[in-house]
Image: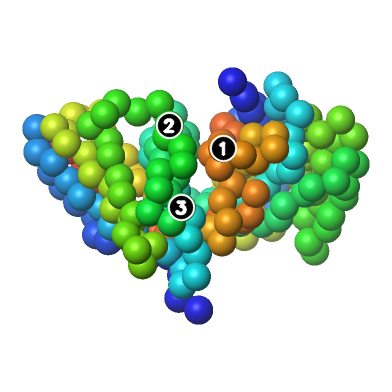
Amino acid sequence: KAGVTQTPRYLIKTRGQQVTLSCSPISGHRSVSWYQQTPGQGLQFLFEYFSETQRNKGNFPGRFSGRQFSNSRSEMNVSTLELGDSALYLCASSSGGANYGYTFGSGTRLTVV
Amino acid sequence: GQQVMQIPQYQHVQEGEDFTTYCNSSTTLSNIQWYKQRPGGHPVFLIQLVKSGEVKKQKRLTFQFGEAKKNSSLHITATQTTDVGTYFCAPPPYGGTTNKLIFGTGTLLAVQP
């Protein structure tokens, strides 16, 4: 059974640009969550999608957005990038949401210069 | 809102020594999950505890859920270098209706051979 696939693995962007990250969950998993991980803030919840609907959102500015497609694949977008957006972005899939174990992808390492 | 604190933030042990990390919540939890993240890796699901006072073992790892369901612990017996990494607790909100898995601050374990 394939795991959670995130692309790209590494990304370097310039301040002001926008970026789109992709996540393909485990087959059959309908819940996809996104997290931002930085050394100073730890794992911060961005949002969670289930069956194409955003069920919950973390405390991030509107520059961070996401969506989920009918095949459960998800994308997150960050517009007008800032230096502080440099982080590891992790996607996690679950069969049902927060009460089930999450399977994480390897993440996308975003560097904003 | 729900707050989750883990202690200690960092622990350095000699190989063969025991290790314990504690997770404390300000609110009652419906369940709690534990994850391990190796350096440079992504979080990997270890276990979920659901019942008050529950104790589960995985080889040298022992997980406990408090009677009041507000705290949990992970104990590693006779640490090995393969145990190196950050251990996170992650409790869903009580009732699990918001599907927003919040991760604790994590405990970084270093094991000296």
Amino acid beneath label 1: Thr
Q: Find residue B29 and report its image quarter.
A: top right
Q: Pointer 3: residues within 10 angstroms few (<14), some, or many (20+)?
A: many
Q: Is residue B18 visible to us here?
A: no
Secondary structure at badge 2 equals loop
State the residue at coordinates (29%, 26%): A61
Amino acid beneath label 2: Gly
Secondary structure at badge 3 equals strand
- Which is in the foreground here, disc 3 or disc 2? 3
Q: Is residue A33 visible to us here?
A: yes
Q: Are marks 3 and 1 in contact (CB under 8 Å)?
A: no
Of labels 3 and 2, earlier in sequence is 3
Direction from residue A76 to residue B6 in the image, left or right: right
Q: Which mark is residue A58?
A: 2
Image coordinates of residue A18 in percent, x first then y, are 13, 41
Residue corresponding to mark 1: B98
Q: Which mark is residue B113?
A: none
Q: What is the distance, in whole Å, between disc 3 and disc 1 at their CAs? A: 12 Å
